[in-house]
Image (tube, coloured by chain):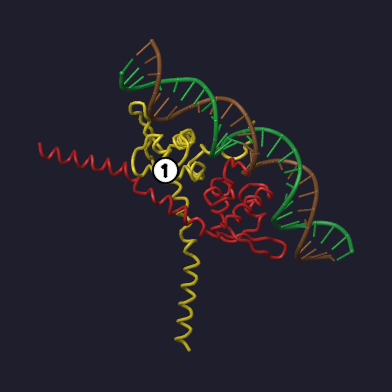
Chain colours: A red, B yellow, C brown, D green
DNA sequence: CCATCGTATTCCCATAACGGAATGCGTCAA
DNA sequence: TTGACGCATTCCGTTATGGGAATACGATGG
């Protein structure tokens, strides 16, 4: 049985978006469809690299492709990001926590002062 | 110069949370502080594995440690998740898109019907 | 001071990533 | 039909992963 080292980048959206360039690609695709070459140039990466990253994104369902003549136009399919947003959202109260604590601390101070 | 293969898991929160078990750890830590052994048992992983994952999480600043006697208690530091939430949140309109399209399609239908 | 508890670290291994360079391949224009 | 264009794929090399097992290490209790 295969000893898994690190989960494949294609195993899920979490792994796919761990790569900065792939996040760049997704960001760019918010602007609409892009043929590979243009996308690569826009983001300053080689065409093969762009193709490879796009393949990963396609495999996890974050982008779609459409053949137009001899080009392949990629577009966003953001549904796969939703689970991530929800998972991370489950921690929202905790990154407000320190602020809340500070806040209640300040409240306590105020109250203590009034009671002096 | 070092040829980078894949970004280190410790390079940022995106990479750190790509590993399911680390997400499990973070989830568990919402319940409060945990000593390593208990945490490992709760999540069904070996103690060394737990320690290793916790190290990664600590290096990217997602958890804090506190020494209590001979145990080390880990707790959540969720601030580092915020950038992720914001990045993913930037795509929210796009995963509502298909719904929106369906919606406007229905509107069009209604309107067309009234104009008959 | 010594044995033990709670953890962290180290070693070993199989796997796969990402980048660069080269190449394969389908489609369109002449 | 042929050549060029737009992409995808393959090969190579370096690096680091996560799991298991063994071990090192600091703090505590006796």
Mark 1 — on which chain does it sit? B
What residue is rendered at 53% in x and 39% in y? Answer: B9
Rendering coords of residue A42 (x, y %): 62, 51
Foreground residue among C21 and B43:
B43
Q: Nearer the viewer, residue B36 or B84?
A: B36
In this rendered view, identify the residue nearer to me: A36 or C24: C24
Viewport quadrant of the C terminus of chain A: top left
Q: Percent from the top left, x then y, of residue A49? A: 66, 48
Q: In the displayed image of the protein, which residue is found farthest to the left?
A: A116
Name the secondary structure under disc 1.
Answer: helix
Can you say whether A12 is above or below A108 in the image? below
Q: Which residue is mark 1?
A: B26
How many circles with numbers are drawn on the protein? Answer: 1
Q: Is residue D4 left or right of residue B10?
A: right
In the rendered image, which quarter is residue A86 located in? Answer: bottom left
Give the x, y percent position of residue D11. Answer: 76, 43
Task: Kindly identify the residue that appears in the image at 34 percent across and 44 percent down.
Answer: B31
């Amino acid at each position: 049985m295969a000893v898994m080292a690190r989960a494949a980048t294609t195993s899920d959206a979490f792994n796919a978006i761990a790569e900065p360039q792939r996040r760049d690609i997704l960001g760019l695709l918010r602007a609409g469809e892009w043929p590979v070459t243009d996308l690569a140039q826009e983001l300053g990466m080689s065409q093969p690299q762009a193709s490879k990253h796009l393949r990963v994104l396609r495999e996890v369902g974050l982008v779609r492709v459409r053949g137009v003549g001899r080009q392949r136009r990629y577009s966003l399919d953001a549904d796969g990001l939703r689970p991530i947003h929800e998972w991370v959202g489950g921690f929202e109260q905790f990154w407000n926590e320190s602020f809340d604590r500070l806040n209640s601390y300040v409240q306590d101070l105020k109250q203590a002062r009034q009671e002096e």
